[in-house]
Image (cartoon, rainbow, N blue to C red):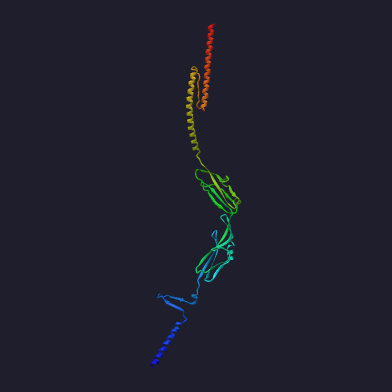
Amino acid sequence: MLKKLIVVLCLLFLFVGIVSAADINSTDDTLKIDDNAGDEIVKNYNEDVLSQKPESTITIKFVNIITGEEYGSQTNTISEGSSWGITMVKFNNMIANHRTFKSDGYKYTFTYWTGENGIVDTTQRFYCTGEDYTVIFYANYDKELLGRLIFILNDEHGHNEHYMTYNDEADYQFTFKEPVDVEEGYLFMHYVDADTGEIYHPGDNFSIKYSEFKGHEKTVEINAVYEKIVDNNTENETIIDNNTDENETQIDNNADENETQIGNGTDEISQDTSNTKNNTKIEVNKNNISDDNNITTVLSSHKTGTALVGFGILAIIIISILIYNRRLKN
């Protein structure tokens, strides 16, 4: 009897074990977790999730290396194990409308594309790194100077200054205008070319042919010419005053010299004869004597005249004595 009971219990445990094993091998792969917040987080650990690969979003930009202008861009997302290639056809399409351009007096002509690894001359291929990234390719150009004209207009006392850089492949022309807000005390006269000396007036045109600055840089500088305004009345008064002072000083000096020289001449005349002192009158006009030489000439003439008078008187006396003696003899 006891042996039968033990066999029944063993069979019961075996049945329970078989049922439990069947529950564990169930095909439900979903695990439910309660985080006490009332939210249910579901994670599915199926084969698709476990086999997912990393991706990279790649952006390609095509840029002018001279101006920084972006000609275009392209973006693509690839996964690990795959690649993306940009052929030379794409590069050529990007540069088709930008093979030449002009800037700041230069002409630029496209030569080649460059990237991180130097000149681009074949298909460029990109791979997934697990991160997004950007690659820039630059369009390179040869530079040729077309010609540059620098035109400068200097206006020191007005407000007509002008500075410009002209880079077009054409002739250049500039029309002069009357200065405005001219500084007080100055009168505008004209404009003048600092190099050639050519004069321009308001309304005149300055023109230059493109051939004169083609292939090089040329600077033209024009200056506005002014004349300082002077008060003529004040200037004339000053000149008259200066002349008056100088004339007065000169007259005073001449008068002093004339008086001294005339005095000496009078003494000499007195020594030659005393009888003719009252008969000879020396008149000296200070206003008619211009210098010392004239005074000396006048005095010499007076001396000569006095000497002749003396000799005449002496001859008369001698003749009178001879006549008197002859009468006595008779």
Q: Residue at x 52, y 22 (%)?
A: 300
- For residue 268, above or below residue 233: above
The residue at the far left in this view is 2
Q: Position of residue 175 (x, y in %)?
A: 57, 49
Query: In this view of the protein, can residue 264 be seen by the observer?
Result: yes
- For residue 44, above or below residue 241: below
- For residue 316, above or below residue 286: above
**The C terminus: image quadrant:** top right
- Using the image as rendered, state which of residue 143 and residue 10 is in the foreground: 10
Q: Residue at x 53, y 8 (%)?
A: 325
- Using the image as rendered, state which of residue 61 and residue 150 is in the foreground: 61
The residue at the far bottom in this view is 1
Q: Is residue 21 left or right of residue 164?
A: left
Q: Is residue 204 left or right of residue 241?
A: right
Query: In this view of the protein, can residue 277 be seen by the observer?
Result: no
**The N terminus: image quadrant:** bottom left
**Number of on-image labels:** 0
Q: Position of residue 162 (x, y in %)?
A: 54, 50
- Using the image as rendered, state which of residue 62 and residue 186 is in the foreground: 62
Q: Position of residue 197 (x, y in %)?
A: 57, 44
Q: Position of residue 272 (x, y in %)?
A: 50, 18
- For residue 139, above or below residue 184: below
Q: Residue at x 39, y 92 (%)?
A: 3
Q: Residue at x 52, y 14 (%)?
A: 314
